[in-house]
Amino acid sequence: MRDKLINSVVYLDSFTLFPEYFLGLSGIYILIVITLITYNVYGLMLQKAISESLGLMLFMASYLLINDDIINVGFSNFNGSILNDSLAYYSKLIVCISSAFYFLIISNFLKYYRLTSFEYLLITLFAIIGLILLCGSNDLLTAYLAIELFSLASYLLASFKKTSTYSIDSGLKYFVTGALSSAFFLLGSSFLYGQLGSINFDVIKLLTDTKYSDKFPLDWVDWPPKDNPEWFNIALRHILWYLFSHFTMFSSSLVDLGLALILFSLFIKLGIAPFHLWSLDVYEGSPTSATFFFAVITKLSIFVLIIRLCYHTLPTFRESWIFYSLILSVISIFVGSFGGLQTRKLKTLFAYSSTSHMGYALLAFTSSIGAKFAVEIIFFYLVIYIIAGLATWFIILSLILKTKKFPNKFNKELGDLASLHKANPGLAVAFATTMFSIAGMPPLIGFLAKLGVFLSIVSSGQELNYYEPIIRRYLTSYNHEYYFVAVITILCSVVSTFYYIRIVKILFFENTLVGKLYHPINNQKVLILSFLVFLLIFLFINPTLLYLIIYKMAWGIRVVHVLF
Amino acid sequence: MLNLFNIFAILLIVSSTVVVLSKHPIFSLLALVTSFLLASFILFLIECEFLAFLFIIIYVGAIAILFLFAIMMLDYKSTDLSRNTIKYLPIAVIFGLGFLSILLYEVNSNFEKYPSDSFYINIYQNWYDLIDSTTDVEVYGQVLYSYFVLQLLITGLILLMVLIGVVYLTNTYSVKPSNSEQVAFKQLARESKFFFKN
């Protein structure tokens, strides 16, 4: 009785969305207070205070998350549209904390980059609410609305600098690409709904369960006999299998099509390689702090949705989603590694870098069939990507030229970094450490991340033989391809180290007598930056905390109690 | 024969013919609005209130007004289109008759004239509707505010966020008025020594 009630009526003790509720209300409160009261008094001086208070609000939201005692149990509420498991819990926590760091980091630079209006921060806050909602969403409608919330906010953030043509241009490009991606998502969900009659992930999981649809229908009477190698027997078995497999309630090819469309739309949002072309222009054109947001914060939640959709909801169709993601991950690692070689613009370089990193995460996702720790590896990779991204973009933001007149050009090129180690040695050392970590040098955490991805892809080829027999029936032909893929991606990773190391070379060993002079950064920012760089080193020595968190995240999607 | 449904249907056909035939775009737009209204009346008659409201709100309220703005912006000069009409008439008749015949065939084969003679489905008086019925709009409201309350809230947040963004992007905060700008009140006030004597 109680279980039924949870699904239909919102009880206060099963109201598991307090962080989102708190953030939404605080956004509306900030809007009202600023437009009615504060704006007339203080004018344009507000951006630093608002940014820091938003950072505190996000810390408060993560406090609310930690203190909620039933959010981790693994049940769905709001009529099954929100799932509260440890995957949602930890991913929400990671998004909250990283975006709190984001707000604390950008607060000093808003004035310099001429983003003084409070709407910028407010729209970013709404985007973060969308990301948090996406982590917990358990049906296609909620997921779509959450994606729309954060992507509409992203279009606005990209085109926020009205005076710059590049910004407007990138906003328009982002809008057109994002609208296409949303259309794909809706088309795919309509296919799924049309075939299965439900948008809820749990219901879709039950309807397409392997237990009922994947077994040979007449095995329980052992007719036709399984081990008889007569051609007639084999042919009969095939024909019967064909007939019975078409006797299901839904057409599995249409479900497959819907899943493919949804996955492609999410890949567009992630910037996976054949769909990555928007990201180069958008990252270069939009304001640097907005690029920071797109590149670092938004990726994790979309991966959570992809894992929910594929690994948790439609494991029956693993053959097809592994096929798509395997090809796309290899392409995107290739493009990200070789595309970054010839570019001189710093933000475009990191757009390529982000493409290749998403490719690595997708590669780990691909290997989730054979390797038992693959889901853990995805989140391990993404958490380290977020930490390294925070440090990198923080350094890029804080490269403020020391000139008399106010600059018109904010985007950096590689040549601008020359002899930074003389102008600001601390910043240069931090930048070099981060670059080494992203490139995957051993005494830093990036090494373990890349090692994990390659380990999971290799062991996926290895363990396939004594994993589930049902999977083996599909995937025996993939065995050698996994080793092949591992070799290709390791070689691409070696190529991609070139441009990370080149940044280090430009920072320290460039043969120029005259370099640019940069502003020093203040104490508070130094504290954050040194904390991030310290994490990069410390987590290599003691990665146990991270391993614990990712283990619990991945454990969440395996143990889910469905209340229906 | 001459019940409300038939009256509205005939009027709808007339007004949609006017949409096609009228020369001036404003008139055809007005006829389009009329045909939307008549279609929503028909939807009211067959008890699809929600769809009728959607017709009025979206088509009349948003799209027709958008058309009107576009026509006013473009400053359309009315030209004589009758020559083209005569030139394309045979093809139009062929295509129109083809589509009409297909449509009539589909309607005739898919819908029955008198659905059932049984007591439960009765075209004159359905007693079950009178005993226990909730209207269309009420049902949508109940579902939206109970089962989909979270989605409704997210939609509200999206609309608020887009509103803020659009206001920011389109609003140009004017800088100080330059010297060349004429302020009528100041000029008048400078003349009169009665008010400002300092």
Image: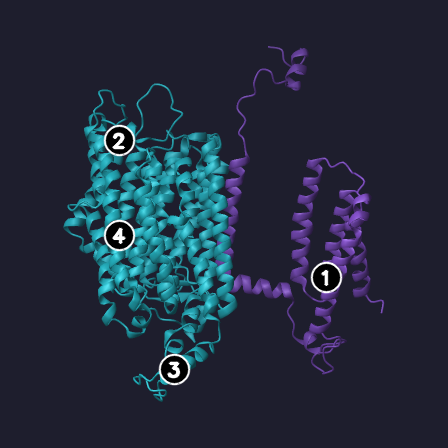
Chain colours: A cyan, B purple
Q: Which residue is mark 2?
A: A522
Q: CA distance from mark 4 to mark 3?
A: 39 Å
Mark 3 and mark 1 in contact? Answer it, CB < 8 Å: no
Under mark 3, the amino acid is Arg
Q: Give whichever of B5, A473 is nearer the camera.
A: A473
User: Which residue corresponds to mark 1?
Assistant: B99
Q: Mark 4 — on which chain does it sit?
A: A
Q: In the image, what residue occupies the spot 38% across and 30% down?
A: A113
Which chain does the residue under circle 2 lie in? Answer: A
Pick whichever, A179 or A23, lies toward us: A179
Amino acid at pointer 4: Ile
Question: In front of the other: label 4 or label 2?
Answer: 4
Q: Which residue is mark 4?
A: A488
Q: Residue at x 21, y 57 (%)?
A: A455
Circle 4: element type: helix
A166 sits left or right of B7 in the view: left
The disc at residue A228 is none
Answer few, some or many: residues within 10 Å of disc 2's Cα (few below 14, many 20 plus, some between 14 and 19): few
Instruction: Check if mark 4's residue and mark 3's residue have beta carbons within 8 Å.
Output: no
